Image (cartoon, helix red, strand yellow):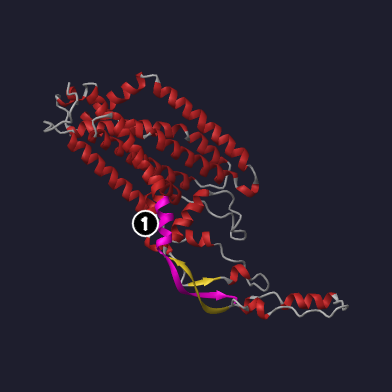
Amino acid sequence: MSWHGIRTIAALELRQRVRTSRWPIVLAVWLVVIALVTFLAYYATNDPQLRSGQAMYDIVIFFVLGLAMLIVPSLTATSVNGDREHGVLATLQTTLLTAWDIALGKLLSAWVIALTFLATSLPFLAWAWFQGGISAGRIVLSLVVLVLVLGAVCAFGLMFSTLTARPVASAVLTYLTIGALVFGTTIGFGLSVFLVTQQESQQVYGLPDNWYELHQPPTPTPGTELTPQQQDQLKLATEPTTADCTHFTRQQPVSHTERIWWMLPLNPFVVVADAAPSEPRSAADPYAAGFTPMRWISAGVRLARKGPDSVVDECQFRVATGAVSAPADPLSTALKSPPVWPYGLGFLLLAGVGSVVVAGRRLRTPVRRLPNGTRIA
Protein backbone atom coordinates (compact mmCIF):
# COMPACT_ATOMS: atom_id res chain seq x y z
CA MET A 1 0.00 0.00 0.00
CA SER A 2 1.32 3.44 -0.93
CA TRP A 3 0.04 6.97 -1.15
CA HIS A 4 0.92 7.01 -4.85
CA GLY A 5 -1.34 4.02 -5.51
CA ILE A 6 -4.21 5.45 -3.47
CA ARG A 7 -3.91 8.79 -5.23
CA THR A 8 -3.83 7.09 -8.63
CA ILE A 9 -7.07 5.20 -8.02
CA ALA A 10 -8.73 8.29 -6.54
CA ALA A 11 -7.71 10.40 -9.55
CA LEU A 12 -9.04 7.79 -11.98
CA GLU A 13 -12.36 7.62 -10.13
CA LEU A 14 -12.70 11.41 -10.01
CA ARG A 15 -11.91 11.81 -13.71
CA GLN A 16 -14.46 9.17 -14.59
CA ARG A 17 -17.17 10.90 -12.58
CA VAL A 18 -16.33 14.37 -13.87
CA ARG A 19 -16.53 13.20 -17.49
CA THR A 20 -20.07 11.93 -17.02
CA SER A 21 -22.93 14.39 -17.34
CA ARG A 22 -24.86 13.01 -14.38
CA TRP A 23 -22.87 14.34 -11.43
CA PRO A 24 -22.65 17.99 -12.57
CA ILE A 25 -26.43 17.94 -12.93
CA VAL A 26 -26.83 16.37 -9.49
CA LEU A 27 -24.50 19.00 -8.01
CA ALA A 28 -26.48 21.80 -9.64
CA VAL A 29 -29.77 20.39 -8.36
CA TRP A 30 -28.21 20.03 -4.90
CA LEU A 31 -27.16 23.68 -4.93
CA VAL A 32 -30.60 24.87 -6.02
CA VAL A 33 -32.39 22.78 -3.38
CA ILE A 34 -30.09 23.94 -0.57
CA ALA A 35 -30.53 27.56 -1.65
CA LEU A 36 -34.31 27.18 -1.74
CA VAL A 37 -34.39 25.58 1.72
CA THR A 38 -32.14 28.30 3.13
CA PHE A 39 -34.31 31.11 1.77
CA LEU A 40 -37.45 29.43 3.09
CA ALA A 41 -35.79 28.93 6.48
CA TYR A 42 -34.79 32.59 6.55
CA TYR A 43 -38.27 33.88 5.83
CA ALA A 44 -39.88 31.35 8.18
CA THR A 45 -37.62 32.21 11.11
CA ASN A 46 -36.91 35.88 10.45
CA ASP A 47 -38.27 36.93 13.81
CA PRO A 48 -36.41 38.08 16.96
CA GLN A 49 -38.28 35.50 19.03
CA LEU A 50 -37.14 32.65 16.76
CA ARG A 51 -33.42 33.48 16.66
CA SER A 52 -33.07 33.42 12.90
CA GLY A 53 -29.35 32.56 12.84
CA GLN A 54 -29.55 29.44 14.98
CA ALA A 55 -32.82 28.30 13.44
CA MET A 56 -31.43 28.71 9.92
CA TYR A 57 -28.27 26.82 10.79
CA ASP A 58 -30.13 23.92 12.39
CA ILE A 59 -32.49 23.61 9.43
CA VAL A 60 -29.78 23.84 6.77
CA ILE A 61 -27.30 21.49 8.46
CA PHE A 62 -30.00 18.87 9.03
CA PHE A 63 -31.22 19.20 5.46
CA VAL A 64 -27.66 18.84 4.15
CA LEU A 65 -27.17 15.72 6.25
CA GLY A 66 -30.49 14.30 5.08
CA LEU A 67 -29.68 14.81 1.41
CA ALA A 68 -26.18 13.44 1.99
CA MET A 69 -27.68 10.25 3.41
CA LEU A 70 -29.48 9.86 0.06
CA ILE A 71 -26.64 10.78 -2.30
CA VAL A 72 -23.41 9.66 -0.61
CA PRO A 73 -24.21 5.90 -0.49
CA SER A 74 -24.50 5.87 -4.27
CA LEU A 75 -20.90 7.08 -4.58
CA THR A 76 -19.38 3.82 -3.31
CA ALA A 77 -22.21 1.28 -3.27
CA THR A 78 -21.45 0.30 -6.89
CA SER A 79 -17.78 1.25 -7.14
CA VAL A 80 -16.27 -2.26 -6.92
CA ASN A 81 -18.93 -4.60 -8.26
CA GLY A 82 -19.69 -2.04 -10.97
CA ASP A 83 -16.07 -2.17 -12.14
CA ARG A 84 -16.12 -5.96 -11.92
CA GLU A 85 -19.30 -6.08 -13.99
CA HIS A 86 -17.67 -3.96 -16.71
CA GLY A 87 -14.42 -5.93 -16.64
CA VAL A 88 -12.35 -3.03 -15.27
CA LEU A 89 -11.52 -4.37 -11.81
CA ALA A 90 -9.46 -7.31 -13.08
CA THR A 91 -7.27 -4.94 -15.08
CA LEU A 92 -6.51 -2.92 -11.96
CA GLN A 93 -5.75 -6.06 -9.98
CA THR A 94 -3.13 -7.19 -12.50
CA THR A 95 -1.09 -4.02 -11.96
CA LEU A 96 1.28 -3.24 -9.10
CA LEU A 97 -1.62 -1.69 -7.20
CA THR A 98 -2.49 -3.55 -4.01
CA ALA A 99 -5.97 -4.36 -2.75
CA TRP A 100 -5.63 -1.61 -0.15
CA ASP A 101 -4.65 0.91 -2.82
CA ILE A 102 -7.84 0.13 -4.71
CA ALA A 103 -10.08 0.14 -1.64
CA LEU A 104 -8.68 3.31 -0.08
CA GLY A 105 -8.47 5.08 -3.44
CA LYS A 106 -12.14 4.45 -4.17
CA LEU A 107 -13.05 5.52 -0.64
CA LEU A 108 -11.01 8.71 -0.96
CA SER A 109 -12.59 9.67 -4.28
CA ALA A 110 -16.10 9.16 -2.93
CA TRP A 111 -15.25 11.12 0.20
CA VAL A 112 -13.89 14.01 -1.88
CA ILE A 113 -17.10 14.15 -3.90
CA ALA A 114 -19.16 14.07 -0.70
CA LEU A 115 -17.10 16.95 0.69
CA THR A 116 -17.66 18.83 -2.57
CA PHE A 117 -21.39 18.63 -2.00
CA LEU A 118 -20.85 19.81 1.57
CA ALA A 119 -18.63 22.69 0.42
CA THR A 120 -21.40 24.04 -1.81
CA SER A 121 -23.57 24.49 1.29
CA LEU A 122 -20.95 26.50 3.21
CA PRO A 123 -22.11 29.90 1.86
CA PHE A 124 -25.59 29.23 3.20
CA LEU A 125 -24.20 28.17 6.59
CA ALA A 126 -22.14 31.36 6.59
CA TRP A 127 -25.34 33.30 5.97
CA ALA A 128 -26.81 31.74 9.11
CA TRP A 129 -23.66 32.77 11.00
CA PHE A 130 -24.02 36.38 9.82
CA GLN A 131 -27.57 36.39 11.16
CA GLY A 132 -26.08 36.11 14.65
CA GLY A 133 -26.76 33.94 17.65
CA ILE A 134 -24.31 31.21 16.62
CA SER A 135 -20.59 30.92 17.28
CA ALA A 136 -17.92 30.01 14.75
CA GLY A 137 -16.63 27.27 17.05
CA ARG A 138 -20.02 25.58 17.03
CA ILE A 139 -20.09 25.64 13.23
CA VAL A 140 -16.57 24.21 12.96
CA LEU A 141 -17.26 21.38 15.42
CA SER A 142 -20.51 20.32 13.77
CA LEU A 143 -18.89 20.43 10.31
CA VAL A 144 -15.93 18.31 11.44
CA VAL A 145 -18.32 15.72 12.87
CA LEU A 146 -20.39 15.84 9.68
CA VAL A 147 -17.28 15.26 7.54
CA LEU A 148 -16.37 12.17 9.57
CA VAL A 149 -19.93 10.85 9.40
CA LEU A 150 -19.90 11.18 5.61
CA GLY A 151 -16.63 9.25 5.49
CA ALA A 152 -18.19 6.41 7.50
CA VAL A 153 -21.20 6.31 5.17
CA CYS A 154 -18.87 6.06 2.16
CA ALA A 155 -17.11 3.14 3.84
CA PHE A 156 -20.41 1.28 4.32
CA GLY A 157 -21.17 1.47 0.61
CA LEU A 158 -17.65 0.34 -0.29
CA MET A 159 -17.96 -2.75 1.89
CA PHE A 160 -21.28 -3.85 0.40
CA SER A 161 -19.89 -3.22 -3.07
CA THR A 162 -17.25 -5.88 -2.42
CA LEU A 163 -19.61 -8.32 -0.71
CA THR A 164 -22.26 -8.53 -3.44
CA ALA A 165 -21.97 -9.34 -7.12
CA ARG A 166 -24.71 -7.01 -8.35
CA PRO A 167 -24.66 -3.21 -7.96
CA VAL A 168 -28.38 -3.17 -7.20
CA ALA A 169 -27.93 -5.49 -4.23
CA SER A 170 -25.08 -3.45 -2.75
CA ALA A 171 -27.03 -0.20 -3.18
CA VAL A 172 -30.08 -1.67 -1.45
CA LEU A 173 -28.00 -3.01 1.44
CA THR A 174 -26.26 0.34 1.88
CA TYR A 175 -29.52 2.26 2.00
CA LEU A 176 -31.00 -0.30 4.39
CA THR A 177 -28.02 0.21 6.70
CA ILE A 178 -28.43 3.98 6.61
CA GLY A 179 -32.16 3.59 7.20
CA ALA A 180 -31.50 1.34 10.19
CA LEU A 181 -29.16 3.93 11.70
CA VAL A 182 -31.47 6.89 11.08
CA PHE A 183 -34.94 5.42 11.57
CA GLY A 184 -34.31 2.04 13.17
CA THR A 185 -32.51 3.45 16.20
CA THR A 186 -35.25 6.02 16.82
CA ILE A 187 -38.08 3.52 16.40
CA GLY A 188 -36.23 0.94 18.48
CA PHE A 189 -35.73 3.42 21.30
CA GLY A 190 -39.37 4.49 21.21
CA LEU A 191 -40.63 0.92 21.36
CA SER A 192 -38.11 -0.09 24.02
CA VAL A 193 -39.36 2.64 26.35
CA PHE A 194 -42.43 0.50 27.03
CA LEU A 195 -40.17 -2.39 28.06
CA VAL A 196 -38.28 -0.34 30.65
CA THR A 197 -41.33 1.41 32.10
CA GLN A 198 -42.78 0.00 35.31
CA GLN A 199 -44.73 1.03 38.38
CA GLU A 200 -42.42 2.16 41.16
CA SER A 201 -42.43 4.20 44.33
CA GLN A 202 -41.22 7.63 43.23
CA GLN A 203 -40.03 10.37 45.55
CA VAL A 204 -41.87 13.59 44.70
CA TYR A 205 -41.39 17.15 45.88
CA GLY A 206 -44.59 19.02 45.23
CA LEU A 207 -48.19 19.43 46.30
CA PRO A 208 -49.87 16.42 47.91
CA ASP A 209 -52.46 14.81 45.69
CA ASN A 210 -55.28 15.86 48.04
CA TRP A 211 -54.14 19.49 48.47
CA TYR A 212 -56.83 21.01 46.26
CA GLU A 213 -59.47 18.81 47.86
CA LEU A 214 -58.50 20.09 51.30
CA HIS A 215 -58.41 23.72 50.17
CA GLN A 216 -61.77 24.01 48.50
CA PRO A 217 -63.27 27.50 48.93
CA PRO A 218 -66.29 27.72 51.24
CA THR A 219 -69.67 27.89 49.60
CA PRO A 220 -70.84 31.52 49.70
CA THR A 221 -74.12 32.29 51.41
CA PRO A 222 -76.89 32.94 48.88
CA GLY A 223 -77.47 36.64 48.42
CA THR A 224 -74.13 37.58 49.98
CA GLU A 225 -71.61 39.48 47.88
CA LEU A 226 -67.93 39.39 48.74
CA THR A 227 -65.94 42.56 48.85
CA PRO A 228 -62.85 42.85 46.58
CA GLN A 229 -60.64 42.37 49.63
CA GLN A 230 -62.48 39.20 50.60
CA GLN A 231 -62.23 37.91 47.04
CA ASP A 232 -58.46 38.45 47.07
CA GLN A 233 -58.14 36.65 50.39
CA LEU A 234 -60.24 33.76 49.10
CA LYS A 235 -58.11 33.55 45.97
CA LEU A 236 -54.89 33.48 47.96
CA ALA A 237 -56.27 30.79 50.23
CA THR A 238 -57.00 28.49 47.29
CA GLU A 239 -53.72 29.05 45.40
CA PRO A 240 -50.69 27.00 46.46
CA THR A 241 -47.33 28.52 47.31
CA THR A 242 -43.87 27.03 47.60
CA ALA A 243 -44.46 26.66 51.32
CA ASP A 244 -47.15 24.07 50.54
CA CYS A 245 -44.72 21.78 48.71
CA THR A 246 -43.61 18.73 50.65
CA HIS A 247 -41.71 15.49 50.06
CA PHE A 248 -43.84 12.38 49.68
CA THR A 249 -43.88 9.03 47.88
CA ARG A 250 -46.19 8.19 45.00
CA GLN A 251 -46.75 5.03 42.98
CA GLN A 252 -46.41 5.98 39.32
CA PRO A 253 -44.90 4.71 36.03
CA VAL A 254 -41.14 5.27 35.82
CA SER A 255 -39.20 4.93 32.55
CA HIS A 256 -35.59 3.80 32.98
CA THR A 257 -34.26 5.26 29.74
CA GLU A 258 -30.71 5.03 31.09
CA ARG A 259 -30.84 1.35 30.07
CA ILE A 260 -31.59 2.01 26.39
CA TRP A 261 -30.15 5.48 25.70
CA TRP A 262 -27.23 3.94 23.80
CA MET A 263 -29.50 3.37 20.79
CA LEU A 264 -29.85 7.09 20.08
CA PRO A 265 -26.16 8.08 19.61
CA LEU A 266 -25.96 5.53 16.77
CA ASN A 267 -28.13 7.91 14.73
CA PRO A 268 -26.02 10.26 12.54
CA PHE A 269 -28.51 13.09 13.11
CA VAL A 270 -28.14 12.73 16.87
CA VAL A 271 -24.34 12.74 16.57
CA VAL A 272 -24.33 15.98 14.57
CA ALA A 273 -26.98 17.62 16.77
CA ASP A 274 -25.28 16.76 20.04
CA ALA A 275 -21.88 17.90 18.79
CA ALA A 276 -22.92 21.55 18.85
CA PRO A 277 -26.37 22.21 20.33
CA SER A 278 -27.87 25.68 20.42
CA GLU A 279 -27.75 27.63 23.64
CA PRO A 280 -30.58 29.54 25.34
CA ARG A 281 -31.01 33.20 24.51
CA SER A 282 -30.04 34.47 27.95
CA ALA A 283 -30.04 33.45 31.58
CA ALA A 284 -32.92 35.85 32.25
CA ASP A 285 -35.11 34.25 29.59
CA PRO A 286 -33.98 30.64 29.22
CA TYR A 287 -37.13 29.46 27.45
CA ALA A 288 -36.81 31.91 24.55
CA ALA A 289 -34.40 29.71 22.61
CA GLY A 290 -36.47 29.85 19.44
CA PHE A 291 -36.74 27.06 16.89
CA THR A 292 -33.56 25.10 17.64
CA PRO A 293 -34.07 21.39 16.86
CA MET A 294 -30.39 20.54 17.42
CA ARG A 295 -30.70 21.77 21.00
CA TRP A 296 -33.89 19.79 21.55
CA ILE A 297 -32.37 16.57 20.22
CA SER A 298 -29.17 17.01 22.20
CA ALA A 299 -30.98 17.73 25.45
CA GLY A 300 -33.40 14.86 24.87
CA VAL A 301 -30.61 12.33 24.38
CA ARG A 302 -28.74 13.52 27.45
CA LEU A 303 -31.93 13.37 29.51
CA ALA A 304 -32.47 9.81 28.28
CA ARG A 305 -28.96 8.86 29.39
CA LYS A 306 -29.56 10.43 32.79
CA GLY A 307 -32.74 8.44 33.38
CA PRO A 308 -35.43 9.29 35.93
CA ASP A 309 -34.66 11.73 38.73
CA SER A 310 -34.36 10.36 42.23
CA VAL A 311 -36.76 13.11 43.31
CA VAL A 312 -39.29 14.54 40.86
CA ASP A 313 -39.63 18.28 41.41
CA GLU A 314 -43.23 19.18 40.61
CA CYS A 315 -43.25 22.31 42.70
CA GLN A 316 -41.51 24.50 40.14
CA PHE A 317 -44.08 23.66 37.48
CA ARG A 318 -47.30 23.59 39.49
CA VAL A 319 -46.70 26.45 41.89
CA ALA A 320 -46.56 30.00 40.60
CA THR A 321 -47.49 32.12 43.60
CA GLY A 322 -44.73 32.78 46.06
CA ALA A 323 -41.95 31.34 43.91
CA VAL A 324 -38.60 32.74 44.95
CA SER A 325 -36.97 32.25 41.53
CA ALA A 326 -37.82 31.36 37.97
CA PRO A 327 -38.10 27.62 37.30
CA ALA A 328 -35.01 26.01 35.87
CA ASP A 329 -35.06 25.07 32.21
CA PRO A 330 -34.71 21.25 32.10
CA LEU A 331 -33.14 21.41 28.64
CA SER A 332 -30.45 23.84 29.77
CA THR A 333 -29.79 21.66 32.79
CA ALA A 334 -29.44 18.60 30.56
CA LEU A 335 -27.02 20.40 28.22
CA LYS A 336 -24.64 20.92 31.14
CA SER A 337 -24.10 17.16 31.37
CA PRO A 338 -21.34 15.45 29.33
CA PRO A 339 -22.13 15.03 25.61
CA VAL A 340 -23.03 11.72 24.01
CA TRP A 341 -21.82 12.41 20.48
CA PRO A 342 -18.33 10.93 21.08
CA TYR A 343 -19.98 7.53 21.65
CA GLY A 344 -21.97 7.72 18.43
CA LEU A 345 -19.10 9.09 16.38
CA GLY A 346 -16.77 6.45 17.79
CA PHE A 347 -19.22 3.72 16.77
CA LEU A 348 -19.59 5.11 13.25
CA LEU A 349 -15.82 5.45 12.83
CA LEU A 350 -15.19 1.92 14.10
CA ALA A 351 -17.88 0.60 11.77
CA GLY A 352 -16.35 2.58 8.92
CA VAL A 353 -12.85 1.25 9.61
CA GLY A 354 -14.23 -2.27 9.83
CA SER A 355 -16.00 -1.78 6.50
CA VAL A 356 -12.76 -0.67 4.84
CA VAL A 357 -10.94 -3.69 6.28
CA VAL A 358 -13.59 -6.02 4.88
CA ALA A 359 -13.40 -4.29 1.50
CA GLY A 360 -9.61 -4.55 1.41
CA ARG A 361 -9.67 -8.24 2.24
CA ARG A 362 -12.33 -8.92 -0.38
CA LEU A 363 -10.19 -7.25 -3.06
CA ARG A 364 -7.15 -9.44 -2.45
CA THR A 365 -5.96 -11.65 -5.28
CA PRO A 366 -6.06 -14.42 -6.21
CA VAL A 367 -9.79 -14.74 -5.59
CA ARG A 368 -10.58 -18.21 -4.34
CA ARG A 369 -14.24 -18.23 -5.32
CA LEU A 370 -16.52 -15.89 -7.25
CA PRO A 371 -20.33 -15.95 -7.41
CA ASN A 372 -21.84 -17.58 -10.48
CA GLY A 373 -22.13 -15.26 -13.44
CA THR A 374 -19.48 -12.83 -12.18
CA ARG A 375 -17.41 -11.32 -14.94
CA ILE A 376 -13.63 -11.32 -14.44
CA ALA A 377 -12.34 -9.46 -17.48
From the viewer's perspective, tell me whether residue 47 is left or right of residue 370.
Answer: right
SS category of the residue bearing label 1: helix
Q: In which quarter of the image is the C terminus?
A: top left
Residue lying furthest front in this view? Answer: 222
Residue 201 vs 69, above or below: the answer is below
Q: Is residue 7 visible?
A: no
Q: Mark 1 highlights which residue?
A: 262
Image location (x, y in percent) of residue 243: 63, 79
Residues in magenta, as a range: 186-207
Residue 311 vs 294, above or below: the answer is below
Tell me which amino acid carries mark 1.
Trp
Q: In which quarter of the image is the N terminus?
A: top left
Image location (x, y in percent) of residue 240: 66, 75
The structure residue drawn at horizontal position 23% and vertical position 30%, both measured from the top left corner, is 165
Q: Is residue 68 visible?
A: yes
**Total number of numbered labels?**
1
Answer whether residue 74 is magenta in the image: no
